[in-house]
Image (spheres, rainbow, N blue to C red):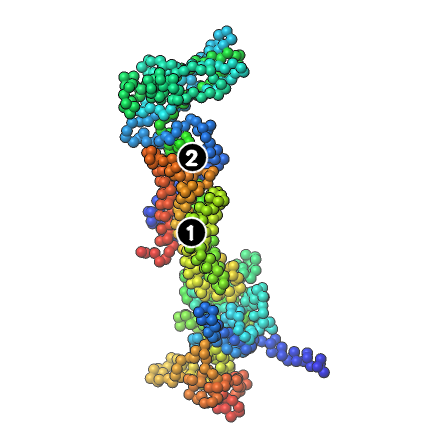
Amino acid sequence: MNTLRKAWQDLARYPSALAGLAIIAALIALSVYTLIAIPYAEAIRLWRGGEDVWYENPKNAQPAWTNWLPGPDQPETLVLKSAAGEALRTVKAVSGTTDIALTFTFDYAADGFPQELAVYFTSQFVEKQPYVSLAWHTPDGRDIRLGDFSIRQSETFRLSQDEKLTRRLKGLPAEQGLFVVPSEAGAAPAALTPLKGRYELRISGLTFEEGSDLEAEFVLYGQVHGLAGTDHRRRDLMVALLWGTPIALAFGLLASLGTTVTTMVISAVGAWFGGWVDGLIQRVTEVNLILPFLPILIMIGTLYSRSIWLMLGVSILLSIFGGAIKGYRAVFLQIKEAPYIEAARSYGAGAGRIILVYLVPRIIPILIPQLVSVIPTFVFLEASLAVLGLGDPVLPTWGKLIDDARANGALFQGQYYWVLEPAVLLMATGLAFAMVGFALDRVFNPKLRGV
Amino acid sequence: MIQMQLPVNTAVVSAPAEAALLSVRGLHVWFELRRWGFGHAGYVRAVDDVSFDLRQGEAVAIVGESGCGKSSLMRAILGLHRPTRGEVVFRGQTVSAFNARDLRAYRAQVGFVQQDPFGALPPFMTVARILEEPLLINGVKDPAERAARVRKALEEVKLSPVGDFLPKFPHMLSGGQQQRVVIARAMILEPRLIVADEPVSMLDASVRVEILRLLRGLQETHNLAVIYITHDLSTVRYFAERIFVMYAGRLIEKAGVDDLLQTPRHPYTHALLAATSDPDAHNATVFKEVPPGEPPSLVKPPPGCRFHPRCAQAIAGRCDEHVPPEFAPQPGHAVACWLHEGPDAPA
């Protein structure tokens, strides 16, 4: 206990260690939050989900914080649901038919145009489909007819893809034509600006049956979304950023613990028993050091399975017989000759007890910094595998984000945030563990003390 | 007739073994030298044909210079080295034939006090833990009993107040205190035999006497057998009843303390005694005669008596050809030297 407190006091003298610890604490807090806020099953559902889950999100939207940067403000996504009371609803029954009027009102203040416009209808009827007609009311008082059609139980009207509407708007797609300042119509598309003010979307529906009803959801897809932005499948990048944290930490920590501790025990066994046991361990290590690490993982990922836990197991197995075994062995060979080991044998300690109780504690000071410094190596390994297309097919991770970004040419299309966000998190993790590891090395390693 | 004789013979053979607590018979400890990792390149004959008996409660000193095989002999007795030939018999049982459990039981009866007290104590354990380890290993399961025995052992080596020492780490103790902890650890399993390997050579002169007196006191109260290994004859006088002189892997002279110190028989013992310093002003002006040369290589020891190349009295054709057997110029005094062959040997 005293030793621990002493080690902590020594460690606290290094500002870099404190900064590293703060980052690690933040990452851990983030992981805990993630695991509580987005349970595993939910994360998988979200990440594997398609249009059905993410239809309310824009595609490839920048993060909302880009609006803080100088330049035009881009609109955020606006979702208005009549079922949630977000539309003015008037109902009139007239001789067997019912008039249902839904009016969506919103203020538009952005400097850019929305990405897309869509209305999602749901309706109940037995035989006769309800009929709707849509109209657009601009702040300067113009009314634009959008279209009339009958709807099924579930109907999607994508204003942006309606060619008749585009023709009515003089060739401009709906998301521009409905917002543009009238005097600018006909200018080059890049010079257009939207008219700011209060817009209305008026839907008048007719149902022809008793008990028939309809609801509508108006989605104005923005150009920016959330803290992290979205990808090509409308998925919120935040899900992967959040879930990547516990996965990266768990992968790094487990791999590092598994490798370091096993390596230490194996080299202790070799050093203690000597003879053919030591010889075997050393030869296996030498052969393993020559084996190419990444190609073996790629081979397993390609031919067998890309599960992150399998990759973890194989990484540990391949790293156990690494160069560290030689280093530990050198230390153990030295400790083995200490008189207190001979004394322990003389009062009856067996090989297992000598290794675990007498040899291992002496190497802990070397082991702890090693353990911490090795964690980022494995975090990066997981990311590298994902970038090589060998990431876990199910789990959202930082590496997967970079891989998706690469596959979709994010950097050629200016979607820098898609690469930047996971990369920053990866770098922060690496930096934090490296800073703590170096400081621990100074605290525990007598050879670096006082340097 | 034959049937009648057999039990008589067995009784005669086993009688001394039962009387002796420990008997070492024809012990050889050789280490194989390898060439290129696998080729045989001879042996280091660290212990070569050593025999002696030790009674319960008896203290003997094994004296010899560095590299004469004292430590290898000690390790073979502790069961840390397997004898190449010969055997170590403890209370009628051969140590090298023990299985793991018997060996642990045997080691519990033999305490070990090492030369370097700081090295002998694990630096990462407290005194309490250090003393608890032998008890844990030897199956003392009750924590209260362990604590009581730890306290008792510390009181016996006069480290008091006990409570002050229990939580300390070895580096917080002085050399003498460390050696007392080592002795307490050797005593905690209530052994019958203590093997002490130069227990005071690394201590300050002022502490040496106290530690030796402590060991002597423990030996007398517990009726312990003690093997005291040293290169310093001046400390032997106060400690042991018998002295064995070791040279190049062999015991060359065995005798009672007074007998050996007053009438040494072997030329090497003479030289050893002459070289022992006494605090006497007269010594400063006198140059002592020391045998020329170095102790022989243990890989290729000289034929015959191993001391003959350095011996002024060596008999050509005898000492350099034939290994001297043990002669007994008087009862209780054995010497392996051709000079003492037969009744007309020089006194």
Report whether B154 appears left or right of A411. right
Position of residue B209 measured from the top left corner of the image (x, y, whole percent): 44, 73
- Is residue A164 visible from the viewing direction of this image? yes
Circle 2 residues within 10 Å: few <14, some 14–19, many ≥20: some
- Residue A47 percent coordinates (x, y): 45, 34
Tag of residue A239: 2
User: Dot 1: few (<14), some (14–19), or many (≥20) neighbours within 10 Å?
Assistant: few
Task: Identify the residue at image location x=34%, y=36%.
Answer: A411
Cβ atoms at labels 2 and 1 below 8 Å apart: no
Give the number of marks: 2
Q: Is A408 left or right of B334, judged from the image as shown?
A: left
Which residue type carries mark 1?
A: Pro
Give the label on residue A292, or none.
1
Please say if A387 is above or below B218: above
Identity of the residue drawn at 33% across and 13% down: A141
The single residue placed furthest to the bottom in the displayed view is B344
Q: Is residue A323 left or right of residue B333?
A: left
Tell us which disc is closer to us: 2 or 1.
1
Residue under the image location 45 percent in, 83 percent down: B307
Q: Quadrant of the N terminus of chain B?
A: bottom right
